[in-house]
Image: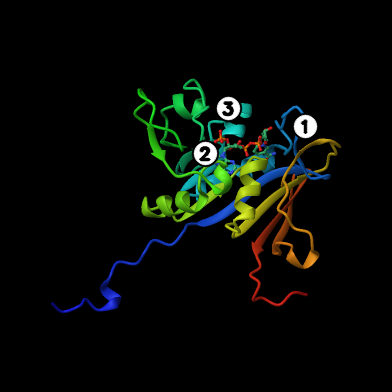
Amino acid sequence: MIAEPRDSLPAAPLRPHVTLHFAQTLDGRIATRTGSSRWISGPPATRFAHELRAEADAVIIGSGTAIADDPLLTVRLVEGRQPLRVVLDARARLPRSSKLLADASTATIHVTCSPARDGEAAHVEAWRLPPGAGGVGVDLDALLQRLAARGVSRVLVEGGNRVITAFLRRELVDRIVVTVAPMILGAGIDAVGDLGIERLDHALRFTPVRVFSLGDDVLIELARRRSTEASA
Ligand SMILES: NC(=O)c1ccc[n+]([C@@H]2O[C@H](COP(=O)([O-])OP(=O)(O)OC[C@H]3O[C@@H](n4cnc5c(N)ncnc54)[C@H](OP(=O)(O)O)[C@@H]3O)[C@@H](O)[C@H]2O)c1
């Protein structure tokens, strides 16, 4: 049997490009200590957040955000196509009444590490994935591989703290768009949790791509700086 030339073999799916987006206060909080986050950003920045959704193939949030905020995760404030909605819910805690599971206007992927539940709505795709490191949440590498195999090439991670932290910890973030609102909360939910970094030269570094204002908010877009790139 003659071996197929290497070039004609199907390429293994690469992981999708990952953009992290969140709105934080001047002191780095994404919510008050009671979990209230609506709305940290003003209307023009919220509209821009919908533009980011429209350019993504899939939008990802954690079950904490899905339960606290019950978002629709659709594109409504601008014209554009609807991304897949992906909720990471390892322990299958999300109630069926939540908008992501009840609103059939576009597809939702409900990712758990638990046996499939009966009676999911037709717009809900149930994915069962292995648990992440230390048994916490869903394995993000497996998630991104499966999304790539599903034809997803750009994902937008919208939070909250634990999911943002997990993507950064696994070094899976290619771009960050952070909206900084001119307010201070003091104690609250941090944008990013502990990454186990103790030395400054181990910091995850990003290169600013652009800085611009929308209403009262300042937006910063940054690209991941790989360790091979020279630092200033
Ligand atoms: N200002 C903003 O831009 C913004 C954006 C989003 C959210 N928020 C705020 O953030 C708060 C929620 O943050 P949060 O940290 O509590 O919740 P979260 O990050 O949205 O969700 C965390 C949960 O996701 C599940 N999960 C599944 N796979 C995971 C993984 N690999 N890594 C981490 N978690 C995984 C875990 O629950 P299971 O084990 O049950 O799966 C985990 O407890 C809310 O107050 C919300 O309003 C603010």
Tell whether circle 1 marks a residue whose Cβ is less than 8 angstroms from ligand 1.
yes
Q: x, y percentage for residue 90?
A: 51, 36
Judging by the rendered image, the residue that carries numbered circle 3 is 70
Q: Secondary structure at mark 2?
A: strand
Hey, which quadrant is residue 5 in on the image? bottom left
Q: Residue at x 35, y 24 (%)?
A: 118
Q: Give the percent coordinates (x, y) of residue 37.
A: 71, 32
Q: Give the class, few, some or many, for how many residues have Cα within 10 Å of label 1's Cα (few <14, many ≥20).
A: some
Q: Which residue is mark 1?
A: 32
Is the residue marked 2 within 8 Å of ligand 1, measured from its CB?
yes
Which amino acid lies under the numbered mark 2 shown in the image of this protein? Leu
Q: Quadrant of residue 104?
A: top left
**The N terminus: image quadrant:** bottom left
Q: Nearer the viewer, residue 157 or 114?
A: 114
What distance separates the C-alpha of mark 3 from that of mark 2? 13 Å
Tag 2 residue: 88
